[in-house]
Image (spheres, rainbow, N blue to C red):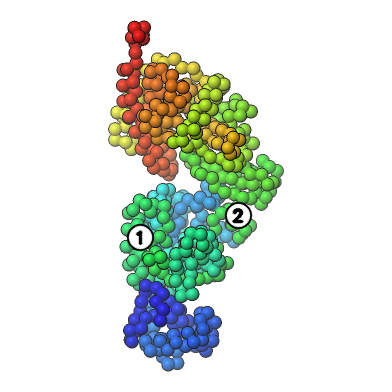
Amino acid sequence: MDVIISLFISGKEGEILNAVTLDILRYLFENKYSNQREIAAFTGLSLGKVNSILKLLEKSGYITGSYEPTDLTKELIKESKPTRAIILAAGFGTRMIPINFETPKALLEVHGEPLIERLIKQLHEVGVDKITIVIGFQKEKFEYLIDQYGVDLSVNADYVVKNNLSSLAKVIDSVSNTYIVPADLWCEQNPFSPIELYSWYMVSDRLDKNSDVSATKRHELVKVARKNDGNRMLGIAYITGSEAVTVRDRVLELAENTDYDSAFWEEALYKDGKMILAANLVRDDSVIEINTYEQLRELDSDSTNLRSKSLHLIAEIFGTSENKITGIKMLKKGMTNKSFRFVVNHDEYIMRIPGEGTDKLINRRQEAKVLNAIQGSGFCDDPIYLDPDSGYKVSRFIPDVRCCDPCKESDIRKCMTLLKKFHYRRFTVDHTFDIYGQIEFYESLWVKDHSAFSDYQMTKNNVWKLKDFIDSQPKDFCLTHIDAVPDNFLFSGRGDEETLQLTDWEYSGMQDPHVDIAMFCIYSLYSKEQADHLIDIYFDSRCEPAVRAKIYCYIAACGLLWSNWCEFKQEMGVEFGEYSLRQYRYAKDFYRFAVNAIQQIPTEAETFDE
């Protein structure tokens, strides 16, 4: 017999039962035997193969001579019976733009029924009542399921920075005779069964360039070369027997390795170029994965979740219907906003939606005044629509766009040239960006009454000591970008036709333009040497010592500013990883650099002597 999976069941004669054999055994248990042709049609095997398997099952004591299942079969069915399920529902669902801003994917309604409720009901139908749902994004919206369906909830707080391998690791101890199910599937027919005889992973009969595995005739799932298509991976699996032990150990091992933070849980299933689970091959239309707004619209055009505020607004702006809005794609999630791309009348646009807590951080009316002041100047792409109350904005999509590479010399020089041109225009508005005032403001937004950093008060006191020096220095106030970071310098076009613009003017206001240099440095995570090099580029190597010292002060102050901002956003469920730590570090390190630089500034007498 062919060995297909790592679950081996030895018969009386030491023979090995594999997935195909066990499928036939299950067929005989669920259906009264008629003839071998029926079994061949069910399995896709030849009559000769079916005949040899039936002889093996009889010889091994699993069926009688009249093809009736024996007590040995009944014991096997009892031992491998499904008893529990884990539903993975923690993720943000980035491709489900713009619905995911309002509703977790698992709670999307198809034909009046939330996806996760349908899965729970289908599990209940086959006798699986012990269900654990791993949640994260908008976790509170799942709480009602405890009362309605008797499920358990487990929170994965790492869902923002890790993939679903970390979700499964939270509940891995319960994996035994267990279904593992992603929450974004809609199955017209129940994909679960009260009888499972071996471990499997579900794939469809459709080829997919994004799949890692291909189902063989022997029911194996083998790794495919990246250039080749595999069978579409559906994410549903059943795990029992020795595979349960292997999966538990492997998931915990990988979850402890930061290299796998972005990994899917399926990574734990591979060994020697194949999965340790057998293939459960199904028709492609039997299990539908809903990843995008348009997929939901195609499956159920009447779904209540299609009533999106942002799409309704787009339809109004362009005088069209919502079903004419196509090509919806998530763009890189920014630190302040969420944005998505869409097509109307064959033209592409971007909608910006303010992120969590943004209404407390940004005055949208001031942003509108800034954009009005610079309109037509060429420093930015003028918006098509901007609501000064909500902050919703629509602008044209610019193709072939890339951000500034803060490690690329030619990019840096072009960005500093544009920044100087902007500063020299001396635009004005009627509001100011107060760095020290904003430090206090962001601190006041914290729910907790103290910083996460144990030496915060000392660091803050040191930054405040720099204020007198900053205030004593001459400054030529003008409209300053404030958020002049590499990601907001956009190159478009190619070669000699490449153009450069600035975007994201939300924090802009009247301020010392040298603040923009400091902001570029701290977002780029520059060292002191790199910061000095940027200063030299901006000033053509003619920066006076007092001005350099002042920029060091700005780096320290702005580092604390954005550190406080990050602490507030983290309380809102937004995680920034290394960025927040480095910002706090700038407040401490550049305080020392600034103090040293201030002490080295020549006095007027020393300058005269020279």
Q: Is residue 128 visible?
A: no
- Please provide percent x and percent y for residue 221: 45, 68
Among the two numbered marks 2 and 1 on one chain, the one whose residue lies closer to the N terminus: 1
Q: Nearer the viewer, residue 479 or 272?
A: 272
Which numbered dot is residue 213?
none
Q: Quadrant of the N terminus?
A: bottom left
Above or below for 342 versus 513: below
Q: Nearer the viewer, residue 160 or 283?
A: 283
Name the spot of residue 503 as percent of width and height, x first: 55, 34
Q: Amino acid at mark 2?
A: Glu
Residue at 54% across / 52% down in the picture?
96
Question: In the rendering, at what x and y percent does residue 57 appear?
Answer: 41, 86
**Residue drawn at the location 38% of the way across and 24% of the way down:** 552
Kindly identify which residue carries mark 1. 251
Q: Residue 294: which disc?
A: 2
Element marked by disc 1: helix
Looking at the rendering, in which quadrant would you find the C terminus?
Answer: top left
- Looking at the rendering, which quadrant does residue 537 occupy? top left
- Classify mark 2: residues with Cα within 10 Å, few (<14), some (14-19) or many (20+): many
Residue 274 coordinates in the image, percent (x, y) = 41, 67
